[in-house]
Image (spheres, rainbow, N blue to C red):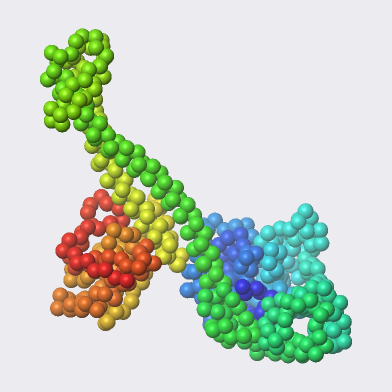
């Protein structure tokens, strides 16, 4: 996990200080309580400074458009009070200087502006990136009085440092650490050997700018066990470690990299994705991980709602099946009514029951009677029960088909959620399940981005949710394109664009696309799966059906592994 430490913040400061100085603050926005965006312009270039003080994602960077979308930034119609305060004091202001206090995770922007009567004033925006203690503080540089904070810190939360409007601004308490570059080896040796902690913890706790991960990486490079007790380190390894730590801290041209899925970060080893621009590293890393978090949270929320509805529909379906199962019972009512009518002479008044032979099956049938009714009235009672039960199971049969469609639809949604790793696509599923009251249809279609692959010269589109499937069906495909889908299993609609009927898919191409359809279905981990394919012109979407539902004909079935 990438943490904004003093070293990384120092690198960001050195890289961007020239842009900050004399930059003009054009616009200020506050999407949430923990996010602030400052739009700045300098030397003909505009940039958005994104500040996030969420304890899990605290960082700042100049944000690009693609990463802005990943963060799912939504600007409220009514700006928060802190945003209005920043606009009052900072919009139109010129940044005079930027400062990064030594060993602190703080960036200070000092700017000049003019008050209502035209007097020049200097104020400072202090951006504190310190985990759960992260904050944004605006204060007057003449008297150090705080004008406002992103969130106030009262005495009940911190006795050492209160933050609120009207209070003096003071730096966080100094850490009980030392600068290794100003430390002699003898002092380093003494400090390390006195500790009972692991080596990496002992060094990170005693010296600035060194995290446990950094110490561990440096130790690993020299085959030193960073997990060993600090006081057990040999003299030789102490000297090696001291030299390596010095070289690392003195090196201003560090390597910054992340691994393939942006879950690990290193400023020592190359993990695969190397960056020579610190801002881009911070922007890409946090945008991707914020999106992952958004996707994970929305997936959990959606699945809970869909599973709740699925349970409800499954219970309804089971109850409907019980009604359908009464078909035989209804037939028995009819049989009893017919037997009583045909054998009325054999039944005496006042009988509670009678056993008559059903000559169609040649079996005896015991019939319960209402002794207060005549034989014919008892027969009528059974005919009435027959009609009532028959109607109930017929309605249940019709309704169960609709319920089954709803269950299939909900299972399809769950599949779509599972394969989705993009927040925008996930929002499409959320809007389908819980549609907003008003949707701009043109805007909806413009925002649809389809996954596609090239297979043997053919462009193959994959609909990863019902909205995309409908868009594929109605807007992208034409009659001679070929449609693929796994048989009787939730999965993506896959369309191969053929261009014209003269372009036929070869058998090996069909097999490749069928395997792709299997991959984008709940059968992806099955040994084998049946896939059907047919021309797009043989696909129809019936009226009044769920999104993504189609019927087809003239299909060919192929089994793929």
Which residue sits at x=28%, y=41%? 399
Say left or right for 35 vs 300: right
Which residue sits at x=38%, y=42%? 315
Say left or right for 373 vs 418: left
Q: Looking at the picture, does residue 143 appear above or below residue 337?
A: below
Say left or right for 99 vs 176: left
Residue 276 position in % (x across, y down): 58, 86
Quadrant position of the C terminus in the picture: bottom left
Query: How many marks are shown on the rendered structure?
Result: 0
Q: What is the quadrant of residue 367 in the picture? A: top left
- Asked whether the viewer can see residue 168, the reply is yes
- Asked whether the viewer can see residue 467, the reply is no
Q: What is the quadrant of residue 211 in the picture? A: bottom right
Q: Looking at the picture, does residue 333 appear above or below residue 170?
A: above
Q: Looking at the picture, does residue 204 appear above or below residue 311?
A: below
Which residue sits at x=16%, y=26%? 358
Residue 264 position in % (x across, y down): 59, 76
Residue 411 position in % (x across, y down): 37, 55
Residue 146 position in % (x across, y down): 74, 63
Asked whether 61 or 513 is in front, the reply is 513
Asked whether 129 or 294 is in front, the reply is 294
């Amino acid at each position: 996990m990438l943490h904004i430490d003093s070293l990384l913040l120092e690198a960001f400061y050195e890289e961007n200080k020239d842009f900050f100085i004399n930059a003009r603050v054009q616009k200020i926005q506050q999407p949430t309580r923990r996010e602030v965006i400052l739009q700045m312009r300098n030397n003909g270039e505009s940039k958005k400074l994104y500040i996030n003080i969420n304890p899990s994602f605290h960082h700042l960077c100049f944000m690009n458009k693609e990463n802005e979308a990943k963060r799912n930034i939504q600007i409220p119609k009514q700006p928060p009070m802190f945003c209005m305060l920043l606009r009052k004091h900072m919009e139109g202001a010129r940044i005079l200087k930027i400062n990064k206090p030594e060993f602190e995770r703080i960036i200070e922007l000092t700017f000049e502006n003019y008050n209502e009567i035209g007097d020049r004033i200097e104020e400072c925006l202090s951006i504190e990136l310190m985990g759960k203690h992260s904050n944004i503080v605006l204060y007057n540089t003449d008297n150090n009085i705080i004008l406002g904070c992103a969130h106030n810190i009262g005495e009940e939360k911190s006795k050492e440092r209160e933050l609120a409007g009207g209070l003096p601004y003071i730096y966080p308490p100094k850490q009980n650490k030392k600068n290794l570059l100003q430390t002699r080896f003898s002092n380093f040796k003494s400090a390390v050997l006195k500790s009972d902690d692991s080596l990496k913890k002992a060094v990170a706790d005693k010296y600035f700018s060194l995290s446990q991960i950094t110490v561990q990486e440096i130790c690993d490079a020299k085959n030193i066990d960073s997990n060993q007790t600090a006081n057990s380190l040999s003299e030789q390894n102490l000297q090696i470690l001291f030299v390596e730590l010095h070289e690392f801290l003195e090196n201003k041209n560090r390597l910054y990299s992340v691994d393939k899925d942006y879950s690990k970060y290193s400023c020592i080893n190359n993990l695969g994705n190397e960056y020579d621009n610190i801002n881009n590293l911070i922007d890409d890393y946090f945008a991707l991980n914020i999106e992952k978090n958004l996707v994970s949270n929305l997936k959990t929320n959606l699945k809970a709602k869909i599973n709740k509805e699925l349970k409800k529909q499954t219970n309804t379906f089971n109850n409907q099946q019980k009604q359908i199962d009464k078909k035989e019972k209804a037939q028995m009512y009819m049989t009893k009514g017919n037997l009583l009518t045909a054998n009325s002479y054999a039944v005496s008044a006042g009988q509670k029951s009678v056993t008559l032979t059903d000559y169609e099956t040649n079996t005896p049938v015991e019939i319960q009677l209402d002794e207060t009714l005549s034989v014919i009235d008892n027969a009528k009672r059974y005919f009435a029960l027959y009609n009532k039960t028959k109607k109930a199971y017929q309605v249940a049969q019709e309704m169960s088909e609709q319920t089954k469609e709803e269950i299939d639809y909900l299972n399809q949604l769950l599949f779509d959620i599972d394969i989705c790793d993009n927040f925008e696509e996930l929002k499409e599923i959320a809007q389908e399940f819980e549609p907003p009251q008003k949707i701009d249809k043109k805007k909806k279609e413009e925002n649809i981005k389809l996954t596609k692959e090239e297979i043997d010269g053919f462009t193959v589109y994959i609909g990863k949710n019902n909205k995309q499937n409908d868009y594929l069906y109605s807007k992208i495909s034409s009659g001679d394109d070929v449609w693929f889908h796994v048989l009787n299993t939730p999965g993506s609609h896959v369309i191969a664009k053929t261009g014209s009927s003269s372009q036929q898919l070869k058998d090996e191409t069909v097999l490749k696309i069928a395997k792709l359809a299997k991959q984008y279905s709940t059968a992806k981990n099955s040994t084998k799966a049946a896939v059907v394919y047919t021309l797009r012109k043989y696909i129809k979407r019936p009226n009044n059906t769920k999104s993504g539902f189609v019927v087809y004909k003239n299909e060919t079935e192929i089994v793929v592994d």
